Image (cartoon, rainbow, N blue to C red):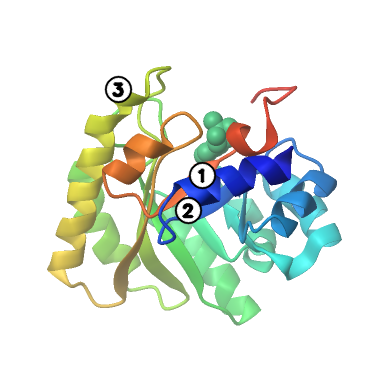
Amino acid sequence: MIKANIQKILSDIPASVMVVAAAKTRTPEDISEAIEAGITAIGQNYVQEAERAYLQIGSKANWHLIGHLQTNKARKAARIFDMVQTVDTLKLASAINQACKEAGKRMPILIEVNSGEEAQKAGAMPGDLFKLINDIAALPNVKISGLMTMGPLSDKPEDSRPFFRITRRLYEEVDRSGIDNVEMKFLSMGMSDSYRVAIDEGANMVRLGTCIFGERISPR
Ligand SMILES: *Cc1c(COP(=O)(O)O)cnc(C)c1O
């Protein structure tokens, strides 16, 4: 089932789009099956859950943190993850920078954009993005490699389009501004119900859970 889902998705989308399998609540067996079917990046929302899967699976795939990171878990995150997609404050970037310095590595990060400018939501507000990127660009052990957005929750994929478009524009603006130590390589947007719209609006990285693994039994 997982294998067939992945084969269909990978044959449907352009080869230039990277699929990150969003694996929250899934077993290491499910994740292994996804990797065998051609998935190269696994998205995890929680450090604890990622660690369990990572200990079984190791570096057969790249591990992406796609959930919020608490600064006190930065050390563990620095060991497990190959990319952190959810950086939205200088404080968090600094904690990752410090942890990576100790671990002797440099972490590719995406800046999460609160494209819907929702009060309770994670992500940097579009108006604060350039200052944040300039500040984080000074940290030697993280590398800004793109932008990520969720957009407001909706059951209609088309509702996401304006927010994907806003994020795409920001991505291009940052790219054009040519800030040292900043590379706009990945634009991560779109989930199971919205990835087609996201790709249409320029996403080159999509985060897919349900359409790979099936409905979550305990949704969160
Ligand atoms: C769960 C999750 C996804 C995938 O959601 P689906 O609707 O199951 O595809 C993508 N991004 C983030 C940040 C998630 O938490």
Q: Which residue is mark 1?
A: 207
The tag earlier along the polypeptide, 3 or 2, is: 2
Image-based side of 50 in relation to 22, left or right: right
Instruction: Estimate the x, y position of residue 98 in percent, counting from the top left.
Output: 54, 70
Measured in 3D between alpha carbons, the distance from the residue under mark 3 to the one under mark 2, in whole angstroms, is 23 Å
Q: Nearer the viewer, mark 3 or mark 2?
A: 3
Quadrant of the drawing holding the C terminus: top right
Q: Amino acid at mark 1?
A: Arg
Q: As shown in the figure, which amino acid type bears the numbered disc 3?
A: Asp
Q: Amino acid at mark 2?
A: Gln
Can you identify the residue that label 2 sits on? 85
Q: Secondary structure at mark 1?
A: strand
Q: What kind of element bears circle 3?
A: helix
Q: Which mark is residue 159?
A: 3
Which disc, if any, is residue 11?
none
- In this view, the mark in front (1 or 2): 1
Q: CA distance from mark 3 to mark 1?
A: 18 Å
The tag earlier along the polypeptide, 3 or 1, is 3
Q: Position of residue 89 (x, y in %)?
A: 39, 51
The answer to whether mark 3 and mark 1 are in CB contact below 8 A is: no
Quadrant in the picture for the N terminus: top right
Percent of width and height locating residue 92 = 47, 54
Front residue of 220/180: it is 220
Question: Badge 3: how crowded within 10 Å, few (<14), some, or many (20+)?
Answer: some
Helix, strand or loop status at disc 2: strand
- Please state the total of marks drawn on the protein image: 3
- Residue in the picture at 62% in, 66% down: 78
Quadrant of the rendered image holding ligand 1:
top right
Residue 35 screen position, x and y as percent: 71, 57
Q: Is mark 1 within 8 Å of ligand 1?
A: yes
Labels 1 and 2: the sequence-earlier one:
2
- Ligand 1 under 8 Å from disc 2 Cβ: yes
